Image (spheres, rainbow, N blue to C red):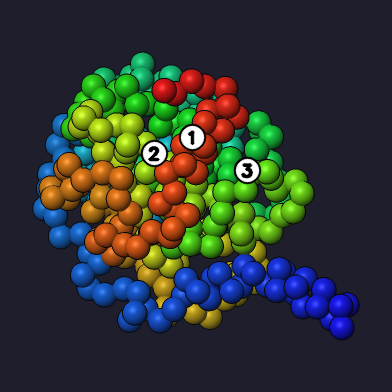
Amino acid sequence: MENNGYILRHLLFKLSPLFIILYFCRARRFLYVAGGRCKSAARLEGKVAIITGANTGIGKETARDLARRGARVIVACRDIAKAEAAASEIRAETGNQQVTVRKLDLADTKSIREFAGKFLAEEKELHILINNAGVMLCPYSKTADGFEMHLGVNHLGHFLLTFLLLERLKQSAPSRIVNVSSLAHHAGRIRFHDLHGEKRYNRGLAYCHSKLANVLFTRELARRLQGTKVTANALHPGSVQSELVRHSFLMMRLWKIFSFFLKTPWEGAQTSIYCAVAEELESVTGQYFSDCQPAYVSPWGRDDETAKKLWSVSCELLGIQWD
């Protein structure tokens, strides 16, 4: 009997990514309605925006929308060839020639610092920072700095990038920071005793933990930025047809089977766009959105003590002081 219990627990552990994905993919009619479209007609001439991971998926659609509104858009990506192709397409479609590409590898703090340094040397303003890039369901691996890949890219990379660009955002205020999180944060926990998954690793749960970190980072960042006219909000884009599940053959098959229930990248980008441009959100901060409206945050995502501790630990891991 005890052996059977062990087998069952082991099976459930291995299948947890499947359960997580199926939870995300509940029928579209319950999770997504027409109201999930950003209806703002705001223009962005004279505004500068950085979007990480904007060479594909919702990041690309977000970049396309902001370019159409007249913004100067910085496409910040690791794969320069794909980024250049995306930027060229956006320039041709929108007529906005101010769509440029800069190399950014969020799995390498050296690359993040180089990106920020070049940006600050070239650009005098920054009004919108959309921390969009992410990885999902990666086999166990570490970043160039030794961080577990999901935590390193999805949380720590964007944490450092935001830190390096924050003064420019303050100087350009009113400005906005938009962190793309996920409904997956509900299944996440911040495992301070094993942040890098060295004792126990499940790639589905590792993604969930990193998305919870996004929510907690947003919460603490917003608290610290009160009175600066720089806002920080997080969001769930929905379950989107994208390359995010490319590391899992099973999930790629499931994504194809359940494609009818998934949002297109354009649909998935709507809440990112809403958080970046909607006039009614100019002074709204520290919130979490889905389908262009406030959404429920898990109890773990509302834990201020955990948010403060994660902030402190993140600074320690990155070797920075952010008071």
Q: Which structural element holds mark 1?
A: helix
Q: Which structural element holds mark 2?
A: helix
Q: Quadrant of residue 165?
A: top left
Of all residues, the one furthest to the front in this rendering is: 305
Neighbor class of circle 1 (other Cα within 10 Å; few <14, some 14-19, many 20+) is many
The residue beneath circle 2 is 220
The residue beneath circle 1 is 311
Q: For the residue marked with disc 1, what is the amino acid?
A: Trp
Q: Position of residue 249 (x, y in %)?
A: 66, 68
The answer to whether 110 appears left or right of 237 in the picture is right
User: Relative to residue 72, is residue 201 depicted above or below?
Assistant: below
The answer to whether 282 appears left or right of 245 in the picture is left
Whichever of labels 3 and 1 marks the residue nearer the N terminus, that label is: 3
Query: At 64% from the left edge and 69% from the top edge, which residue is drawn?
Result: 16
> Whole-Å distance between the Cαs marked 1 and 2?
8 Å
The answer to whether 180 appears left or right of 284 in the picture is right
Q: For the residue marked with disc 3, what is the amino acid?
A: Phe
Q: For the residue marked with disc 2, what is the amino acid?
A: Glu
The residue beneath circle 3 is 192
Query: At 32% from the left edge and 36% from the top edge, which residue is drawn?
Result: 223
The answer to whether residue 307 is seen in the rendering is yes
Q: Cβ–Cβ below 8 Å for labels 1 and 2? A: yes
Q: Nearer the viewer, residue 96 or 163?
A: 163
Q: Position of residue 130 (x, y in %)?
A: 35, 42
Q: Nearer the viewer, residue 246 or 288?
A: 288
Whichever of labels 3 and 2 marks the residue nearer the N terminus, that label is: 3
Query: At 44% from the left edge and 49% from the top edge, which residue is drawn?
Result: 303
Q: Position of residue 253 (x, y in %)?
A: 60, 75
